[in-house]
Image (spheres, rainbow, N blue to C red):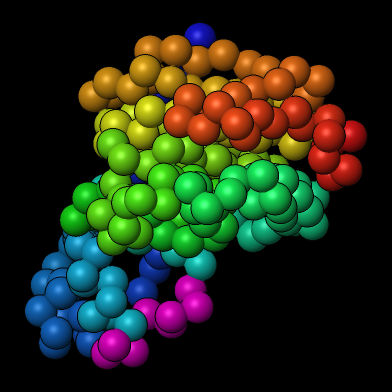
C-alpha cells in the first residue's frame, strides 16, 4: 500500500499579521516580498519568538521551511495519546525515553511536533534526528489524510524507520517502515486486536484494544 504523496505546500500555512511580517523583515528573517514563498529554519523560529513575531504558544510546526498550522485536538485524540504514552512509560524502563507533544528536529528546516516519539536513553536528546529516533507516532482524528501523506513523506525522507499512524475512528494502526527518499517501502495495517511491536523496542508491543479510549 502506498499513499499519495502530499507536499508541504498542501498543508495549512501560518499567516503572519502585517505587524509581525514587518518584524520579520526588520530582523532579516523574511524579505517582505512573496511571503508565501518564504522558507524558515529552526533557528529562525526561535528568533521569531524572541522578537515577538510568533507567539511561543502558537500551534505550529516547521515542515520543509514552512510554518504549518496544527489541527485543534479533540477529546478522543487527547485520551488516546495520553493512554498510549502511559502504556509506553509504564513498561519502558530506564533504557527508553518517551516524548509527548514535543519537537523532533529532523533537519535545519523541518522540525515537526509528533504526538509521541521514543528513542534510546543512551542518546542525548539534542542528537536525536530521523535516523536515530526509534519510533514516531501520530494519533489521527481530524488529521488522518495529512498523517498518511505529507507527514509520511516527511518522515520517510528523513529516515524515520518506524512510523505509526493511530487511526482512532477505524481502530487501527497504519505502520510505515523501510523508508526511502520519497516514501515508505512497507506500509501495513494492524487492527485494534493485533499486537504491533516497535522495531527498536521489542519489549513494548501495543494492542489498541487494550486502551480504554480505543475499545
Tell me if residue 105 comes above or below residue 46 in the rendering: above
Tell me if residue 76 comes above or below residue 179 in the rendering: below
Residue under the point 52% across and 32% down:
201
Observer able to see residue 88? yes
Residue under the point 75% across and 50% down:
83
Q: Report which quarter residue 131 is drawn in.
A: top left
Residue under the point 37% across and 80% down:
54
Which is more toward the observer, 66 or 204?
204
Residue under the point 19% across and 56% down:
108
**Left or right of residue 204: residue 64:** left
Q: Is residue 87 magenta?
A: no
Which is more toward the observer, 121 or 25?
121
**Left or right of residue 16: residue 81:** right
Observer able to see residue 151? no
Q: Is residue 54 magenta?
A: yes
Find the magenta span and give its range. 50-58
Amino acid at each position: 500500500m502506498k499513499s499519495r504523496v502530499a507536499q508541504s505546500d498542501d498543508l495549512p500555512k501560518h499567516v503572519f499579521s502585517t505587524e509581525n511580517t514587518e518584524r520579520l523583515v526588520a530582523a532579516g528573517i523574511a524579505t517582505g516580498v512573496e511571503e508565501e514563498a518564504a522558507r524558515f529554519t529552526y533557528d529562525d523560529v526561535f528568533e521569531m519568538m524572541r522578537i515577538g513575531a510568533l507567539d511561543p504558544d502558537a500551534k505550529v510546526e516547521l515542515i520543509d521551511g514552512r510554518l504549518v498550522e496544527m489541527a485543534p485536538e479533540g477529546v478522543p485524540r487527547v485520551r488516546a495519546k495520553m493512554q498510549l504514552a502511559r502504556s509506553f512509560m509504564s513498561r519502558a524502563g530506564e533504557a527508553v525515553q518517551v516524548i509527548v507533544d514535543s519537537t523532533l528536529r529532523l533537519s535545519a528546516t523541518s522540525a515537526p511536533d509528533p504526538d509521541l516519539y521514543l528513542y534510546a536513553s543512551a542518546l542525548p536528546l539534542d542528537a536525536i534526528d530521523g535516523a536515530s529516533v526509534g519510533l514516531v507516532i501520530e494519533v489521527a482524528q481530524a488529521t488522518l489524510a495529512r498523517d498518511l501523506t505529507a507527514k509520511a513523506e516527511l518522515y520517510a525522507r528523513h529516515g524515520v524507520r518506524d512510523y505509526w499512524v493511530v487511526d482512532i475512528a477505524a481502530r487501527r494502526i497504519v505502520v510505515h517502515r523501510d523508508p526511502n527518499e520519497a516514501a515508505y517501502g512497507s506500509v501495513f495495517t494492524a487492527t485494534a486486536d493485533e499486537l504491533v511491536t516497535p522495531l527498536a523496542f521489542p519489549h513494548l508491543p501495543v494492542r489498541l484494544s487494550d486502551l480504554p479510549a480505543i475499545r
